[in-house]
Image (cartoon, rainbow, N blue to C red):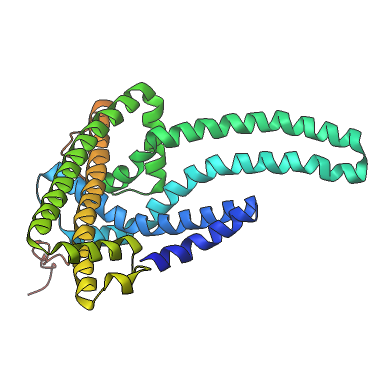
Amino acid sequence: MKQPAAYILAPLRGAYEADNDIALLGYVVLQMLLLLLVWSFYGGALYRMAAVGLTRREPADGESAMAFAARHWRAFVGARLVLWMGVILPLAVFIALASLGPWLGQWVGSTVAGVLLALAILVGAALAVIAALLAGTWFFGGFLQGPTIACEDSDAFDALSRTFGYAGAGMPRLLATRLWYLSGVLIGALWRLALTVLAISLGWACLAVAAPAAMLDRAQAILSAMGAPPDAARLGVTTGDYLVAAAIALVLFVLVARWLSDLIVRVVCGRTAAYLDLRHAIDGVDPSSLRTAPDATFQSAVEAGFEEVVRVGDD
């Protein structure tokens, strides 16, 4: 597992060591876009399952949730990208304007370059205010986009309008609602983390009592080195020690993965519940309301239950 992570981090480390800020920022943006594409599909399915479970009080169907995500992944991507671009583009334009003055100064003189830089500062101040407002809306109300699409079966425009509408209806209420449900998520996640740590501690204590100490020391050395330890020959590491270390690593991976998956589900459910609460408080919509697009299949009059009318003159 170390090698794939090294491949992903190698360009980032190279750009940082070379002091290439443009390459560093570009690689981070690229990884964010790739993560957005993956999360828009699987995260959209999780949001739909959370919406079905919270509104209808029944287990959600994973297959239908994946089909919903396949239909709406563009909405999940588009809503996020619009807010991201709303923050990034004004700052990028400000940087471009600020760098344009000195570059033109080589051709038109330092006086004109100073005038252009002064104008860029004035325009950049307005752009910075716009970016700050959008960043605040993104930070406090960006969580509403996923639940809006999942609960309303809507597109990116509805997600954005609902985000800005609820932020404009009262930022303190929006922040208080989010913090209220976030506190519940944190309490549940910390409790599950405590249980996970307790299970690992009890399992390791039982293993220390039952298993030979020398074998556990060699397995621990393998786990610390994430592979063959430097002094493997001196320790007398065998194939059985590698199997023991692999079994311990597998158990730890499963327990930590269960906690992380539980945390993700809690966050998704908390955001969806916060959206349902805000929708009920602001729009007066019943929290159990869940919109679903009508079936696009067509039926004949007979299939729909209408009896065919005999035409005049027919026998």
Can residue 295 be seen?
no
Tell me where residue 135 appears, x and y as whole percent: 49, 35
Question: What is the quadrant of the N terminus in the image?
Answer: bottom left
Does residue 50 appear anywhere in the picture?
A: yes
Q: Farthest residue to the front: give it.
A: 234
In x, y percent, where is residue 208?
12, 57
The residue located at (18%, 61%) in the rendering is 251
Of residues 139 and 231, the one nearer the viewer is: 231
> Is residue 23 depicted above or below 145 in this figure?
below
Q: Residue at x 32, y 23 (%)?
A: 173
Q: Nearer the viewer, residue 212 or 133?
A: 212
Q: Quadrant of residue 299?
A: bottom left
The one nearer the camera, 247 or 230, is 230
Location of residue 63 with respect to 276 vertically, above or below: below
Q: How many marks?
A: 0
The residue sitting at 58% across, 59% down in the picture is: 14
In the rendered image, the quadrant that contains the C terminus is: bottom left
Q: Answer with the quarter of the image where residue 151 lies.
A: top left
Residue found at x 28% / y 69%:
235
Percent across and percent down for residue 238 are 24, 76
Q: Is residue 240 above or below residue 104?
A: below
**Viewed as shown, does residue 12 lie left or right of 19?**
left
Q: Residue 18 location, x and y as percent? A: 65, 56
